[in-house]
Image (tube, rainbow, N blue to C red):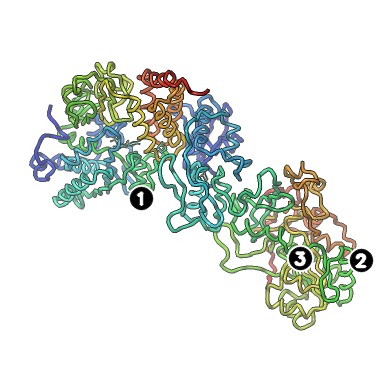
Amino acid sequence: MEKYILPDIPDLHSIAVYEANGGYKAFRKALGMKPEEVTDEVKKSGLRGRGGACFPTGLKWTFMPKQSAKPKYLCVNGDEAEPGTFKDRQILEFNPHLLIEGIVLAAYAMGITTSFVYVRGEYGKWVRMLERALADASSHGYVGDNILGSGFSTNIVVHKGAGAYICGEESSLMNSIEGGRGYPRVKPPFPAQSGLWGCPTTINNVESICNVPVIINNGAEWYAKIGAPKHPGPILVGVSGHVNKPGVYEMPTGLPLLEIIYKFAGGIPGDKRIKAVIPGGSSTMILRGEQLEGVCMDADSLKAAGSSVGTAGLIVMDEDTDLIQVITRISKFYYHESCGQCTPCREGTGWLWKILQRFERGEGRTEDIDLLMDIANNIEGNTICALGDAAAWPVQSMIRRFRDEFENRAKSLTMGSSTIAL
Amino acid sequence: MAKITINGKIFDVDPELTVIQAAAQNGIEIPHFCWHPKLTVSGNCRMCLVEIEKMPKLAIACSTRVADGMIVKTESDRVIKARQAVMEFLLINHPLDCPICDEAGECKLQDYSYKYSVGYSRFDENKVHKPKRVRLGPNVMLDVERCIMCSRCIRFSDEIAKQPVLTFTQRGTHVVLTTFPDTQLDNKYSMNVIELCPVGALTSTDFRFASRVWEMSSTDSICVGCSRGCNTHVWVRKNEILRLTPRFNEAVNSYWMCDSGRLNTFRTVNSQERLHSPMIRKDGVLVDVGWDEAIARAVSDLKSFKKSEIAGIASAFATNEDNYVFQKVMKEVIGTKNVDYVQHVEDDAGDELLIRADKTPNSLGTRQVGVRPAEGGLDITGILKGIEEGSIRALYVLEDDIAEDPRFAAALPNLQLLIVHASVNSKTARFADIVLSCSTFAEKNGTMTNFAGRVQRLRPAVATLEQDRAKDGFAMSRWDKFASQNDRWGRSVKKDARPTWRVLTAIANALGAKLKCTTAEEVFKEIAEKLPPFKGMNYINLGSQGANANAAESVSKQKVTA
Ligand SMILES: Cc1cc2nc3c(=O)[nH]c(=O)nc-3n(C[C@H](O)[C@H](O)[C@H](O)COP(=O)(O)O)c2cc1C
Ligand code: SF4
Ligand code: SF4
């Protein structure tokens, strides 16, 4: 299949190569369109956000006020901290000008004066790569004042995070850019009403933005036909875990997970059985290996299977995997990354992790399984931001789909420790 | 107006309100920790989750705007389960400090545990441990383990006190409240965070470990630290004031008071310098005497002067009742025209929140009840001059330490007679021939008028020798009710002090007048009948929130000089 986001062109990160391969053509084309027409095109394309929630990108853009006395901002989310997710990094390294072109297009469509690209702090090398590309784009007149003599001006600022997963959450990201603590904001107001410094703001994932030049170049109708009809387009799938060829693969949406695992990622080392799969980054619900037949990488299919696309970070676990260890580690992550603002997430994530550590040590009790479930249920939906849900879903799904693993651990305690005083 | 339904009842409410506000206005309490009516919404505690029809998730009542047709349930099974969950989450890492925690008895977390919690814990792990004694500033201590991270204190410091020095650091259960480097919580209102804190995380360095809440009685009163007159609770144990806390009054101080008023104004009441009884000067020294002897001496001494040789200085520290009776006795019974009072305005000592430059609690009231020279009489400057020149030979001073002013201190020895009402061994009292030990603001009934014309009540919180907590209707603590005279909780020290207006009445009647009032309330009744600013007021309708002096009359035209 042809690749649009990460095509196999050597040195595409250099502006000359990018231009030679049709780079910044989409933007020139857009300058001949009205800004609303660009938004419309994105809307018609069916593009859905690649940052985790699959929210329709064009629709999100229409939430921005047309007229605004205050400046309008775009935040491009490259915080990429969800375990199992490493796709945006590839873009920053191999095709940064696609991102820059996408940003300028989005800025044109929404009348954005300044865009902030928020890149996770650990991506020092990739921040430098993006900054280099941005300097080239500016010197070539694609960013800045009066771009290509069109009268349209927009700026791009690269902002490096400081190492907090929570700053990938859109409102926390804005607080972080403002110089505040990385605390998610209570919504409403939504960013399009009151975002960065109280101004209208849109937040899009790096990969989402990279789809925009592809759409403008080829047209919404063409785009909408790629992959799954209700969730179309090329998608970057990061495959990790027990596969022979882990990595980021570009493909149309809607391919079967098994095809991704066996065709793209080269299957399981030692031809072992797949015990479990996390389809879209650690917060998405875990699926049993036996359950994968017919399940595809798109929003509808994964929803029907009881999970979600998330960031399309596919984590594969073979038959020898200790899932108690897996869930304990995942829970530790959300415990460690909870910002601590709201009660259920702050307290619940730590509690989950403490109980799971007991299971890991063989000190879990059968009744703890229901307690874990209840704690997760009490977090889910009751918090300021979705980190609470992200902490709850893996635990809920692990218990729902692998209860036996917990029971075996708990049982081994009861059987092995006859000396426990009651 | 928006029509909303809460728990099946329909209400018409302002569409600008949030659900929690609309509910509160209609008498429905939605439990909450982080929300406070005077602070911005933070939405972090999640205690106020309610069910709103057509919303898939529970919503926080503190940040959700009402909308026409909205149907809210605050007691559905889903809401109750979520609330119990929040309580459980808050308690898992909360230390079981209640037996030694200052907050116990007035702790929102404790109260809600009884009301909204299931009563047992499923938490079987180790709790998180954090620093227990952190000094945030001169007046506030922090126990980080007790903190539930509601951010009220941070928002207060940022938004109300305008000293943004508090913040959280760390993440998750490790979050720690702290001050920014090289700063401390030392603004003039810092102690308000103590009451704002829903738990015992923030405590008063002054009151820490002094008493269990239920061992004290709480009396509604007002602060006498400046002319704002912030509404207060006076907390008393064993007849001793242990702390003052602010009491809500939107017309005066909202929920706040300043640290200085809170910490300093009650010191005189408890002071070692308090007078034990009236005193008269015998052979050059002041000696304790009984009331009858002191009053008889005052009467006979006053008789030996010409009316024009006598002057009276009232006090903006005293009540309206005291000043009213004083000016009446001076002018109508003793017959002098020389009556005035001293102002205590400290330029630049005021601010925009509460603190006023006028350091007396009642200067407007003092003028309103008629403290001013009678036609042709001397004002305060004239009185001072008269003393200096010898034309004023007898001076009667109410509760004001006028000798703090060096000009008075230098002039007072010229006097033949100085009668002083004082509660402590003040500078002025040391010059006096007769000292009448007077009840402080915390020991008597009375009213004061604040700078804006708000007439507010004082109530006795500490009993003097002639008072009995039970018989005289004082607020009672658990010890007041149940301790016996034989155990140490029942024993307390009472001072032999009397309210100024009553002593004045006794002197006046001994001089032949027929003043009839026997309670402060009766004096106030007379004031309300005679003086337009107080028209229609009485102790009942002043209640706990006071009332505005009738506007047209509230500011005396009289110019006062000091
Ligand atoms: C805890 C948390 C972390 C998140 N981290 C990221 C992230 O690293 N990158 C990202 O694009 N979106 C992240 N999101 C989702 C963003 O809030 C937001 O939905 C997204 O950036 C919107 O972009 P999209 O519409 O293009 O998907 C995170 C959300 C949560 C709740
Ligand atoms: S859900 Fe967790 S991460 Fe999100 S605001 Fe609440 S405490 Fe912070
Ligand atoms: S110290 Fe008290 S007021 Fe401040 S955040 Fe903690 S619990 Fe809230």
Dot 2 or dot 3: first in sequence order is 3
Res B273 → quadrant: bottom right
In this view, the residue in front, B171 or B540, is B171
* Element type at mark 2: loop
* Element type at mark 3: strand
In this view, the residue in front, B159 or B378, is B159
Res B442 → quadrant: bottom right
Q: Which mark is residue A179?
A: 1
Q: Are marks 3 and 1 in contact (CB under 8 Å)?
A: no
Residue pointed to by mark 2: B512
Residue B468, visible in the rendered structure: yes
> Whole-percent x and y of residue A133?
16, 47
The amino acid type found where label 1 is placed reads Gly
The amino acid type found where label 2 is placed reads Gly
Q: Is mark 1 within 8 Å of ligand 2?
A: no
Residue pointed to by mark 3: B422
Q: Nearer the viewer, mark 2 or mark 3?
A: 3
Which residue is painted at 35% across and 40% down in the image?
Answer: A166
Residue B337, visible in the rendered structure: no
